[in-house]
Image: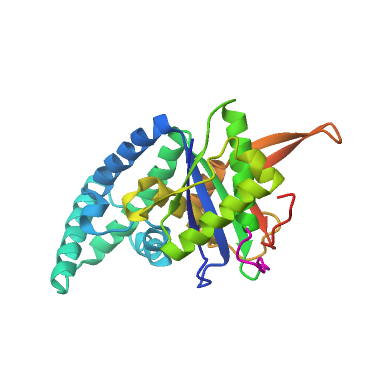
Amino acid sequence: MLYFIDESGHDHGASPYEVLAAVAVQEKDLWNLIQAIRAAELEFFGVHLASVGIEFKGTKLLKRKTFRLAGEGEAILPDERRNLVRDFVKRGYEAGLTHSKVKVTSRELIAYGQTVLAFVERVFQLMGRFRVKTFAAMVDINAPRPAKGDYLRKDYAYLFERFFYHLESTSSSEMGLIVFDELDKARSRILLDQMSGYFLRTANGYQRSARIVPEPFFVHSDLTTAVQLADLVAYCASWAIRLNSMKKPAREELIWLANHVFNLRYVGSRFDEHDGEAWPVYGMFHLNDLRPKERD
C-alpha cells in the first residue's frame, strides 16, 4: 500500500487550519488511476495540464476566483467548453514563455472556471473508482508544538496510527510505504530523524514499524500525480471539511467538492480489550495540540 502525503496551511497564511493529508492507493491501482486522470485532462481541457504549465494544486485550481468565473454565465456544453479552454490555456502558456500579454474573452474565462470544477469533481470520482482512501490531520493554527525538534509531531504520529489500522483491515501481511512531497534537505533530514525516533524508540511506533516502512520516499510533487491528489485533499480539508470540534467557517462554495473527499475517508474500528467494545477509528481528525505523548 502506498501512502502519499502533502500539507496545506503550514505557512500560516490565509488557510484556516493546518492540514497533513494523505491518500492511500494500492500498487495495482496506481497506474490505472494515473492514466484515468490523464485521460480526464484531455477530455476536459483538450491538453495535459503539465504541457501548458498548469499546476495540479488546490491553491491554483480551487481558489475563489475559479468559482466566481464558473458562475458568471450559463453552463457551456462540454465540447464547446473544451475547445474554448484548450485555446485559452495554450495562448496563456505561450504568452508566459515570451512574457507577453494574452487577450482573453469573458466566455473563455467562464469556460475555464466551469472546466476546472468539473475536472476536479471527476478526479475525486476516479479516486473512488480506484478504491483510494483519504486521511487528514486538521490542526488549529495556534496549536502548541513540541519544544524539542527531535520529537515527531502528534499529527504525524496519529496519521501513521491510522495507516497501521488501515493496513490491518486490508491485509494480514501488506506493508505500507510512505511518500512525501519533497522538502528542502534540512527539513527532510529533520523529519527522517523524527520518524526514526518514533518507529524505533516508542512502543507504539515500534509496533507499527511491523507494517509501515519507517524510512519514507521523497518526490517532486509536480511530477507525482498521487502527491497532487493529497494536495487537493489537504486544501479541501483546510477550507471546507468541518468536524464537530472545528469552529472556523467553511467556504460554502467548496463544500460540494469537499464532500467527495470526506466520503472517501478511511473509517475503521478497534476492539478495546478493557471494555470489550469496538470503537470507530476515523482517517480524518482534528487536533488542538501537537505535543507528543509516549503512548502515541
In this rendering, position of residue 244 left or right of residue 106: right
Q: Which residues are magenta?
A: 143-151
Q: Residue furthest right?
A: 275
Between residue 71 and residue 208, name the one nearer to us.
208
- Point 50% across, 46% down: residue: 215
Between residue 73 and residue 46, name the one nearer to us.
46
Using the rendered image of the protein, determine whether residue 237 is visible from the camera's viewpoint: no
Determine which quarter of the picture holds residue 142. Answer: bottom right
Q: Which is the main secondary structure of the residues drawn in magenta?
A: loop
147 inside magenta stretch: yes
Residue 211, x across and y down, in percent: 58, 35
In this rendering, position of residue 85 left or right of residue 19: left
59 is higher (above) or lower (below) than 208? below
Residue 275, x across and y down, in percent: 86, 35
Q: Residue furthest top?
A: 172
- Point 38% across, 67% down: residue: 65
- Point 67% across, 69% down: residue: 147
In this rendering, position of residue 38 left or right of residue 264: left
1 inside magenta stretch: no
Residue 220, x across and y down, in percent: 35, 54
